[in-house]
Amino acid sequence: MVVKAVCVLKDESHFQRQFPPGAGDTTPGVAGVVQFEWQENEPVLIKGNISGLAPGKHGLHVCTFGNLLNGHFSLGSHFNPYEKKHGGPEDEERHVGDLGNVIANKEGVAEFQIQDRLLQLSGVLSIIGRSLVIEEKEDDLGKAGNEESLLTGNSGKGLACGVIGIADVVMNLT
């Protein structure tokens, strides 16, 4: 059986109703689509295309809640059902929601494909109904030696977010 999910990322200003759209945002218009696909006994395949980013690395995280009422402020912390410290996708010590970094090219577009062994698309630890966030800065993968690094990877504020939902098909993102 194949399980598929999708997340449509919208710019953080879309959720901040108390300010005009784009107020104080240095990278307005961040948006994208991220797809997830899982087959039994295989890692989850994540494919995405996100535009409007500053060139360089940006942290990508699954957060605990799918509540977009106040943008990334209402999503909770990185999804962490095993109560571990922040880390990189290949680390044994990491949040389930720690997906590492994606790299935006000079046009501000990040196209990526990731395989993750901890994400689940079914069962009590499913990420369906939770949220995905693309961050302002590079995720230090918990290696900076300070408290914030062990919580968030020092990746800054969320630029765009969305709820991960069940999908019936996976589209070609290229």
Image (cartoon, helix red, strand yellow):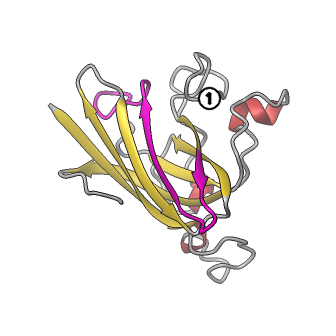
Q: Residue at x 59, y 69 (%)?
A: 107
Q: The C terminus appears in which quarter of the rendering?
A: bottom left
Farthest front residue? 106
Farthest left residue? 1
| Lateral position of residue 165 relative to residue 60, left or right | left
Farthest top residue? 92
Vertically, is 85 above or below 104?
above
Task: Say whether residue 86 is magenta.
Answer: no
Q: Amino acid at mark 1?
A: Gly
* x and y, in percent, of residue 41 in the image: 27, 19
**Span shown in magenta:** 102-125
Using the rendered view, name the quadrant where residue 44 is placed.
top left
Q: Residue at x 75, y 75 (%)?
A: 24
| Lateral position of residue 143 relative to residue 92, left or right | right
Q: Taking the image as drawn, is residue 9 in sight?
A: no
Closer to the camera in the image, 153 or 147: 153
* x and y, in percent, of residue 58 in the image: 64, 50
Using the rendered view, name the quadrant where residue 127 is placed.
top left
Q: Residue at x 26, y 48 (%)?
A: 166
Vertically, is 22 above or below 83?
below
Q: Secondary structure at mark 1?
A: loop
Closer to the camera in the image, 155 or 17: 155
Vertically, is 56 above or below 29?
above
State the residue position of label 1: 88
Q: Taking the image as drawn, is residue 21 in sight?
A: yes
Farthest bottom residue? 20
* x and y, in percent, of residue 14 in the image: 54, 73
